[in-house]
Protein backbone atom coordinates (compact mmCIF):
# COMPACT_ATOMS: atom_id res chain seq x y z
CA UNK A 1 0.00 0.00 0.00
CA UNK A 2 1.07 3.56 -0.64
CA UNK A 3 1.35 6.26 2.03
CA UNK A 4 -1.99 7.86 1.14
CA UNK A 5 -3.89 4.59 1.44
CA UNK A 6 -2.25 3.81 4.80
CA UNK A 7 -3.28 7.25 6.10
CA UNK A 8 -6.86 6.69 4.92
CA UNK A 9 -7.04 3.30 6.62
CA UNK A 10 -5.68 4.71 9.89
CA UNK A 11 -8.16 7.59 9.77
CA UNK A 12 -11.08 5.25 9.07
CA UNK A 13 -10.09 3.05 12.01
CA UNK A 14 -9.93 6.10 14.28
CA UNK A 15 -13.43 7.13 13.23
CA UNK A 16 -14.72 3.59 13.87
CA UNK A 17 -13.18 3.21 17.33
CA UNK A 18 -14.13 6.63 18.73
CA UNK A 19 -16.90 8.21 16.64
CA UNK A 20 -17.88 10.82 19.28
CA UNK A 21 -14.36 12.23 19.56
CA UNK A 22 -14.03 12.19 15.78
CA UNK A 23 -17.21 14.24 15.36
CA UNK A 24 -16.03 16.75 17.95
CA UNK A 25 -12.65 17.01 16.27
CA UNK A 26 -14.23 17.60 12.87
CA UNK A 27 -16.48 20.32 14.31
CA UNK A 28 -13.49 22.06 15.84
CA UNK A 29 -11.53 21.80 12.59
CA UNK A 30 -14.44 23.41 10.71
CA UNK A 31 -14.39 26.36 13.13
CA UNK A 32 -10.73 26.98 12.25
CA UNK A 33 -11.40 27.75 8.56
CA UNK A 34 -9.55 30.79 7.25
CA UNK A 35 -8.16 32.58 4.20
CA UNK A 36 -4.62 33.97 3.99
CA UNK A 37 -2.54 35.83 1.43
CA UNK A 38 1.25 35.57 1.27
CA UNK A 39 3.79 37.25 -1.02
CA UNK A 40 5.32 35.15 -3.78
CA UNK A 41 8.23 35.93 -6.12
CA UNK A 42 7.83 38.22 -9.15
CA UNK A 43 4.95 40.32 -7.76
CA UNK A 44 2.65 37.36 -7.26
CA UNK A 45 0.73 36.26 -4.14
CA UNK A 46 -0.51 32.95 -2.81
CA UNK A 47 -4.18 33.10 -1.82
CA UNK A 48 -4.89 30.10 0.40
CA UNK A 49 -8.14 28.90 1.94
CA UNK A 50 -8.60 26.17 4.55
CA UNK A 51 -12.21 24.97 4.17
CA UNK A 52 -14.42 22.07 5.20
CA UNK A 53 -14.03 19.28 2.68
CA UNK A 54 -17.49 19.67 1.08
CA UNK A 55 -17.05 23.40 0.53
CA UNK A 56 -13.49 23.10 -0.73
CA UNK A 57 -14.29 20.30 -3.17
CA UNK A 58 -17.38 22.15 -4.42
CA UNK A 59 -15.39 25.34 -5.03
CA UNK A 60 -12.65 23.48 -6.89
CA UNK A 61 -15.21 21.56 -8.96
CA UNK A 62 -16.93 24.82 -9.98
CA UNK A 63 -13.63 26.27 -11.18
CA UNK A 64 -12.83 23.05 -13.02
CA UNK A 65 -16.18 23.08 -14.84
CA UNK A 66 -15.65 26.72 -15.82
CA UNK A 67 -12.20 25.87 -17.24
CA UNK A 68 -13.54 22.88 -19.20
CA UNK A 69 -16.36 25.00 -20.66
CA UNK A 70 -13.98 27.78 -21.68
CA UNK A 71 -11.60 25.30 -23.30
CA UNK A 72 -14.47 23.78 -25.25
CA UNK A 73 -15.26 27.21 -26.73
CA UNK A 74 -11.65 27.72 -27.86
CA UNK A 75 -10.29 29.86 -25.03
CA UNK A 76 -6.51 30.16 -25.63
CA UNK A 77 -5.61 30.35 -21.93
CA UNK A 78 -4.31 27.30 -20.11
CA UNK A 79 -6.62 25.40 -17.80
CA UNK A 80 -4.76 26.72 -14.74
CA UNK A 81 -4.98 30.32 -16.00
CA UNK A 82 -8.71 30.02 -16.60
CA UNK A 83 -9.30 28.63 -13.11
CA UNK A 84 -7.24 31.42 -11.52
CA UNK A 85 -9.07 34.12 -13.52
CA UNK A 86 -12.46 32.57 -12.74
CA UNK A 87 -11.64 32.57 -9.03
CA UNK A 88 -10.91 36.32 -9.12
CA UNK A 89 -14.06 37.07 -11.14
CA UNK A 90 -16.35 35.10 -8.84
CA UNK A 91 -14.90 36.52 -5.62
CA UNK A 92 -14.84 40.15 -6.74
CA UNK A 93 -18.07 40.07 -8.76
CA UNK A 94 -16.42 41.77 -11.74
CA UNK A 95 -16.83 40.87 -15.39
CA UNK A 96 -13.12 40.25 -16.04
CA UNK A 97 -10.22 39.46 -13.70
CA UNK A 98 -8.45 42.75 -14.51
CA UNK A 99 -11.47 45.04 -14.03
CA UNK A 100 -11.36 45.14 -10.24
CA UNK A 101 -11.15 48.25 -8.01
CA UNK A 102 -7.72 48.69 -6.49
CA UNK A 103 -7.68 47.67 -2.83
CA UNK A 104 -3.98 48.24 -2.29
CA UNK A 105 -1.91 50.48 -0.07
CA UNK A 106 0.69 51.48 -2.65
CA UNK A 107 3.43 53.82 -1.43
CA UNK A 108 5.07 55.63 -4.33
CA UNK A 109 7.10 58.87 -4.54
CA UNK A 110 5.52 61.53 -6.74
CA UNK A 111 8.55 61.70 -9.03
CA UNK A 112 8.30 57.96 -9.61
CA UNK A 113 4.64 58.36 -10.52
CA UNK A 114 5.37 61.24 -12.89
CA UNK A 115 8.73 59.87 -14.09
CA UNK A 116 10.04 63.45 -14.29
CA UNK A 117 13.25 64.33 -16.08
CA UNK A 118 16.18 64.84 -13.77
CA UNK A 119 14.85 62.22 -11.35
CA UNK A 120 15.73 59.22 -13.45
CA UNK A 121 17.66 57.38 -10.72
CA UNK A 122 14.88 57.96 -8.20
CA UNK A 123 12.14 57.36 -10.79
CA UNK A 124 13.22 53.76 -11.09
CA UNK A 125 13.07 53.07 -7.36
CA UNK A 126 10.41 50.46 -6.58
CA UNK A 127 7.06 51.16 -5.02
CA UNK A 128 5.85 49.33 -1.93
CA UNK A 129 2.54 47.52 -1.48
CA UNK A 130 1.69 47.15 2.18
CA UNK A 131 1.69 43.47 3.14
CA UNK A 132 3.51 42.43 -0.04
CA UNK A 133 6.69 44.46 -0.34
CA UNK A 134 8.55 46.17 -3.19
CA UNK A 135 7.24 46.15 -6.75
CA UNK A 136 8.88 47.55 -9.92
CA UNK A 137 8.30 51.23 -10.65
CA UNK A 138 6.70 50.46 -14.02
CA UNK A 139 4.16 48.12 -12.42
CA UNK A 140 3.39 50.73 -9.74
CA UNK A 141 2.72 53.35 -12.41
CA UNK A 142 0.49 50.91 -14.29
CA UNK A 143 -1.56 50.28 -11.14
CA UNK A 144 -2.03 53.98 -10.48
CA UNK A 145 -2.92 54.73 -14.10
CA UNK A 146 -5.65 52.08 -13.93
CA UNK A 147 -7.03 53.40 -10.64
CA UNK A 148 -9.23 56.39 -11.66
CA UNK A 149 -11.49 54.48 -14.12
CA UNK A 150 -11.93 51.80 -11.47
CA UNK A 151 -13.21 54.25 -8.84
CA UNK A 152 -10.15 53.93 -6.61
CA UNK A 153 -8.75 56.57 -4.26
CA UNK A 154 -5.29 58.08 -4.45
CA UNK A 155 -4.12 59.72 -1.23
CA UNK A 156 -1.25 62.15 -0.94
CA UNK A 157 1.14 61.54 1.96
CA UNK A 158 3.97 63.94 2.64
CA UNK A 159 7.49 63.10 3.74
CA UNK A 160 10.10 64.80 5.87
CA UNK A 161 13.50 65.47 4.23
CA UNK A 162 14.68 62.12 5.62
CA UNK A 163 12.05 60.24 3.60
CA UNK A 164 9.94 59.34 6.62
CA UNK A 165 6.21 60.04 6.51
CA UNK A 166 5.29 63.14 8.54
CA UNK A 167 3.12 63.09 11.66
CA UNK A 168 -0.60 63.52 12.23
CA UNK A 169 -2.23 64.49 15.52
CA UNK A 170 -5.43 63.53 17.35
CA UNK A 171 -6.97 64.04 20.80
CA UNK A 172 -8.91 60.77 20.76
CA UNK A 173 -8.18 57.94 23.20
CA UNK A 174 -8.26 55.40 20.40
CA UNK A 175 -6.41 56.05 17.18
CA UNK A 176 -8.93 57.30 14.58
CA UNK A 177 -9.21 55.29 11.40
CA UNK A 178 -7.25 57.77 9.31
CA UNK A 179 -4.41 58.07 11.82
CA UNK A 180 -4.29 54.30 12.35
CA UNK A 181 -4.05 53.84 8.60
CA UNK A 182 -1.26 56.43 8.44
CA UNK A 183 0.77 54.64 11.14
CA UNK A 184 0.25 51.32 9.39
CA UNK A 185 1.52 52.77 6.12
CA UNK A 186 4.49 54.35 7.88
CA UNK A 187 5.61 51.30 9.87
CA UNK A 188 4.51 48.64 7.31
CA UNK A 189 5.39 45.71 9.63
CA UNK A 190 5.46 45.15 13.40
CA UNK A 191 7.80 47.77 14.83
CA UNK A 192 9.38 45.43 17.39
CA UNK A 193 13.01 45.20 16.17
CA UNK A 194 13.17 41.41 15.88
CA UNK A 195 9.65 40.88 14.50
CA UNK A 196 8.41 41.27 10.92
CA UNK A 197 4.81 40.09 11.41
CA UNK A 198 1.86 42.01 9.92
CA UNK A 199 0.51 44.93 11.95
CA UNK A 200 -2.64 44.09 13.90
CA UNK A 201 -2.71 46.71 16.69
CA UNK A 202 -1.93 50.44 16.82
CA UNK A 203 -0.29 50.99 20.19
CA UNK A 204 0.63 53.99 22.36
CA UNK A 205 4.40 53.97 22.92
CA UNK A 206 3.93 56.00 26.10
CA UNK A 207 0.69 54.60 27.56
CA UNK A 208 -2.35 56.85 27.44
CA UNK A 209 -2.79 56.34 31.20
CA UNK A 210 0.66 57.88 31.72
CA UNK A 211 -0.16 60.94 29.65
CA UNK A 212 0.93 59.63 26.27
CA UNK A 213 -0.74 61.52 23.40
CA UNK A 214 -2.72 59.85 20.63
CA UNK A 215 -0.40 60.96 17.85
CA UNK A 216 1.68 59.54 15.05
CA UNK A 217 4.87 60.26 17.02
CA UNK A 218 3.54 58.29 20.01
CA UNK A 219 1.95 55.55 17.93
CA UNK A 220 3.44 52.36 16.60
CA UNK A 221 2.15 49.41 14.63
CA UNK A 222 2.55 46.07 16.41
CA UNK A 223 1.47 42.51 15.83
CA UNK A 224 -0.96 41.10 18.38
CA UNK A 225 1.69 38.99 20.11
CA UNK A 226 4.17 41.85 20.60
CA UNK A 227 1.49 44.24 21.81
CA UNK A 228 0.39 41.78 24.51
CA UNK A 229 3.99 40.88 25.43
CA UNK A 230 5.00 44.50 26.13
CA UNK A 231 2.26 44.78 28.77
CA UNK A 232 3.95 42.13 30.91
CA UNK A 233 6.05 43.22 33.92
CA UNK A 234 9.59 44.25 33.07
CA UNK A 235 8.93 45.56 29.55
CA UNK A 236 9.49 49.26 28.86
CA UNK A 237 9.02 51.33 25.73
CA UNK A 238 9.67 55.01 25.24
CA UNK A 239 10.50 57.44 22.49
CA UNK A 240 13.95 58.88 22.08
CA UNK A 241 15.28 61.64 19.85
CA UNK A 242 18.13 60.88 17.45
CA UNK A 243 20.18 63.65 15.88
CA UNK A 244 20.40 63.37 12.11
CA UNK A 245 23.40 64.01 9.88
CA UNK A 246 23.97 67.53 8.65
CA UNK A 247 22.83 66.49 5.17
CA UNK A 248 19.45 65.40 6.55
CA UNK A 249 19.11 68.30 8.98
CA UNK A 250 16.99 68.00 12.07
CA UNK A 251 15.98 65.25 14.46
CA UNK A 252 13.70 62.23 14.41
CA UNK A 253 12.10 60.09 17.09
CA UNK A 254 12.75 56.38 17.51
CA UNK A 255 11.39 53.84 19.95
CA UNK A 256 13.61 52.36 22.67
CA UNK A 257 12.48 48.89 23.77
CA UNK A 258 13.89 47.45 27.04
CA UNK A 259 13.14 43.77 27.73
CA UNK A 260 12.81 42.16 31.18
CA UNK A 261 16.41 40.87 30.79
CA UNK A 262 17.69 44.42 30.37
CA UNK A 263 18.43 44.17 26.66
CA UNK A 264 17.87 47.43 24.79
CA UNK A 265 16.67 47.68 21.19
CA UNK A 266 16.11 50.70 18.99
CA UNK A 267 12.92 50.21 16.95
CA UNK A 268 13.21 52.06 13.66
CA UNK A 269 10.49 52.89 11.17
CA UNK A 270 10.47 50.89 7.94
CA UNK A 271 12.23 52.72 5.13
CA UNK A 272 9.77 54.20 2.64
CA UNK A 273 10.61 54.52 -1.03
Image (cartoon, rainbow, N blue to C red):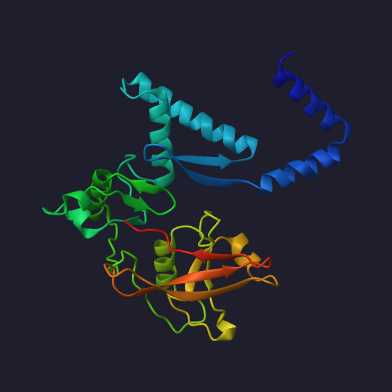
Q: Residue at x 37, y 40 (%)?
A: 43
Question: Most extreme residue toward the bottom, as rendered?
Answer: 211
| Quarter assignment of residue 13 | top right
Judged left or right of residue 114, residue 180 is right
x, y percentage for residue 79? 41, 24
Depth order, front residue of 33/162: 162
Q: Can see residue 137?
A: yes
Depth order, front residue of 99/36: 36
Judged left or right of residue 228, residue 223 is left
x, y percentage for residue 66? 42, 29
> Quarter of the image containing the C terminus?
bottom left
Depth order, front residue of 24/234: 234
Question: Most extreme residue toward the right, as rendered?
Answer: 17
Q: Residue at x 35, y 70 (%)?
A: 244
Q: Residue at x 38, y 35 (%)?
A: 85
Q: Can see residue 175?
A: no
| Quarter assignment of residue 270 | bottom left
- Compared with 7, 159 (above or below) is below
Judged left or right of residue 200, residue 129 is left
x, y percentage for residue 138? 24, 44
Q: Residue at x 35, y 58 (%)?
A: 272
- Compared with 138, 170 (above or below) is below
x, y percentage for residue 18? 87, 36
- Compared with 20, 230 (above or below) is below
Question: Most extreme residue toward the front, as rendered?
Answer: 246
Q: Total number of numbered labels?
A: 0
Amino acid sequence: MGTRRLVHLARAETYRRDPAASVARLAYASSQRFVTVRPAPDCMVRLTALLPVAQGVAAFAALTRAADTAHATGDPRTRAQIMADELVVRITGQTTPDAIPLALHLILPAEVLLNRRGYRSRAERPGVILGHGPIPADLARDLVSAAPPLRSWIKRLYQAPTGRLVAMESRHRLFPKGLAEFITLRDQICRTPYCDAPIRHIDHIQPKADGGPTSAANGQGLCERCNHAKEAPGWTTRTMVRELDEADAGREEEVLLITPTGHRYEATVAENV
